[in-house]
Image (cartoon, helix red, strand yellow):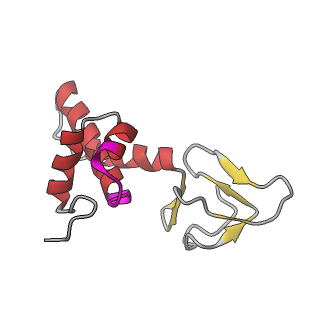
Amino acid sequence: MSTAAPTAPAASTAKKWTCDHCGVAVSRMGGEKVELPETWDASAEGTYCLICRRERAAQAALDGAPQGSPLDVRAKLRRAALIEFEVSRRPDHGDGVIAKACRSSVSAVAAARQRLKLPAPGQPCK
């Protein structure tokens, strides 16, 4: 549980931030207040670190899978959800950077950009 209210904006500060899913905590040794880490998110649902945010995106995709989906279909849904999460989170990063972060291919990232209708970095919106 975080020490800040779950609806706190990202710019707020607290002495300690704790991920509501995995329990990892961020604080300063001296006990002074620190901003919510840039990769974390605080919302009405809770406060989550980047790893748990990725896992929640993947789980949401799996929850939407048809009942009895084969393992390979579920793996593809999970991978696509992770890539779409990263592209949405960092649309200004290149496809290669996102592919590396997701352990995926550049073409898979480019396809996710097209699905989300997001331009590649440096390209105007259509």
Image quadrant containing the C terminus:
bottom left
Q: How many marks?
A: 0
For the record, the magenta segment spans 88-96
Q: Residue 27 at what x, y percent from top left?
A: 74, 55
* Quadrant location, the N terminus: bottom right
Residue at 38 percent of width and 58 percent of height: 89
Q: Is residue 98 left or right of residue 71?
A: right
Residue 23, quarter of picture: top right
Residue 58 seen from this side: no
Indicate the quadrant where residue 80 lies: top left
User: In the picture shown, does residue 72 fall above or below 41?
Assistant: above
Say if the magenta span includes residue 48: no
From what the image shows, is residue 61 above or below residue 118? Answer: above
Quarter-of-image position of residue 75: top left
Residue beneath the point at 18% across and 37% down: 67
- Identify whether 25 is placed above or below 71: below
